[in-house]
Amino acid sequence: MKRLVFETEHEQLRETAKQFLEKECLPNVEKWEANRLVDREAYVAAGNYGLIGFNMPEEYGGGGVDDFRFNAVIVEEFAKFGLACPGISLQNDIVGPYFKNLATKEQLDRWMPGFASGELIGAIAMSEPGAGSDLAGIRTTAVRDGDDWIVNGSKTFISAGINSDLVVVVARTDPEAGHKGFSLLVVERDMEGFTRGRKLDKMGQHAADTSELNFEDVRVPAANLLGKEGRGFYHLMENLPSERLSIAIAGVAGARATFDETLQYVKDRKAFGQPIGSFQNSRFVMAELETELDIAEQYVDRCLQAVVDGELTAVEAAKAKWWCTELGKKVVDQCLQLHGGYGYMNEYRVAKDYVDVRIQTIYGGTTEIMKEIIGRDLGL
């Protein structure tokens, strides 16, 4: 079904993203997978291609274009690529908006030129060993001491935890204030007491540097407070819908790429003297998946238009997030089944897709949390 949400300039950026992936990433995939880490230079290259910070103010080296459809085409192309590549969505869709919407002019002057160029890599540290979906359970603390905050605690499952230079840390600044007791503090690389734990040994997405972070009496200048003191929880809630939509977009686009590869496979692979795609079961499975992908794309596109119109709600984003990621998981699982024994071989893309896709129903808010958000909105 024809997609109507994108215009000519969005498709031009899509071509740029494809060129970047083919020229800058594809030759390095094996090295990055072996090292379990994408080189920092890849972020600088992405900045040179204009793939980072296009939604940041022009005076800081950004593109000055605040249109989430540009974010979407980058997310889609990276998801279709499906191999080791820098976490550009993390920069544009998750970390970037915190800086763009909350940073002071002095903070923008300090951080944004490097962020837009890819020389400074951002991360956001929410999850802790004892607090994942339950953000209210965060135990990392920040205590005011003169012109500084003293940060203590630990975080885990932090994307870009190894490469990051600017880490937006969610900390409890008032232990008695409940949801109003959280603030966001930017911890910078090499601040004393800030250490990185092990790079986590994940089931999939091996080249993505997910790690533990530790803070022991880290002295963070008060000038690094991002947004308003005590408003950290609300700042998170304001930014989570765009993050969840981004994950939904990736879920559909990645599943579409797996589906397309499988469609060719079932046409080429023969069993009992005929292509396996000609068997009724195969036809029905592929027909079902194609239909569901089309429907999911249309809902995602409607959500994209809602972002452009300033109308996307947290509930609509939650619907997109859980449905599209669960669909992505279903598509990859059934496509692997259609590959038979070859689907279990790592030389086939579907095997990598199978382990990589599994996290999508968990990070950014689990499927269960998304349903809870929707259910509460229904008055239940």
Image (cartoon, grey):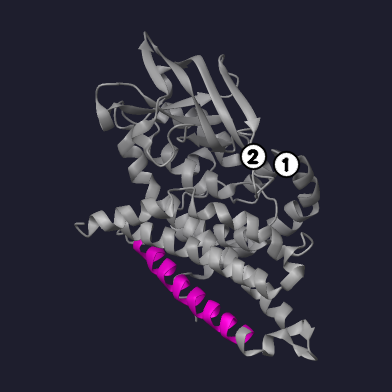
Q: Residue at x 72, y 85 (%)?
A: 276
In the image, residue 100 lies in the stretch drawn in magenta:
no
Position of 1 compared to 171: left or right? right
Q: In the picture shown, does residue 226 fall above or below 117?
A: above
The residue closer to the viewer here, 299 or 120, is 299
Q: Tell me, yes or no, whether the two marked residues, 1 and 2, touch with CB atoms within 8 Å.
A: yes
The amino acid on which the numbered mark 2 sits, given as a three-letter code, is: Asp
**Residue 209 got which mark?**
2
The residue pinned by badge 1 equals 36
Residue at x 59% of width, y 38% of height:
160
At which x and y percent is residue 304? 41, 63
Residue 87 visible in the displayed image: yes
Secondary structure state at the residue bearing disc 1 = loop
> Of residues 46 and 330, which is closer to you in this image?
330
- Please state which amino acid type lies under the numbered disc 1: Arg
Q: Which mark is residue 163?
A: none
Asked whether residue 314 appears in the rendered view, the answer is no
Answer with left or right where residue 31 lies relative to residue 313: right
Circle 2 SS class = loop
Q: Is residue 379 left or right of residue 362?
A: left
Q: Indicate whether 125 appears above or below 142.
A: below
Q: What residue sits 32% from the left and 53% below the top?
A: 372
**What is the distance, in whole Å, between disc 1 and disc 2 at their CAs?**
7 Å
State the image coordinates of residue 146 (x, y, percent, origin top left).
Answer: 37, 8
Q: Is residue 298 magenta?
A: yes
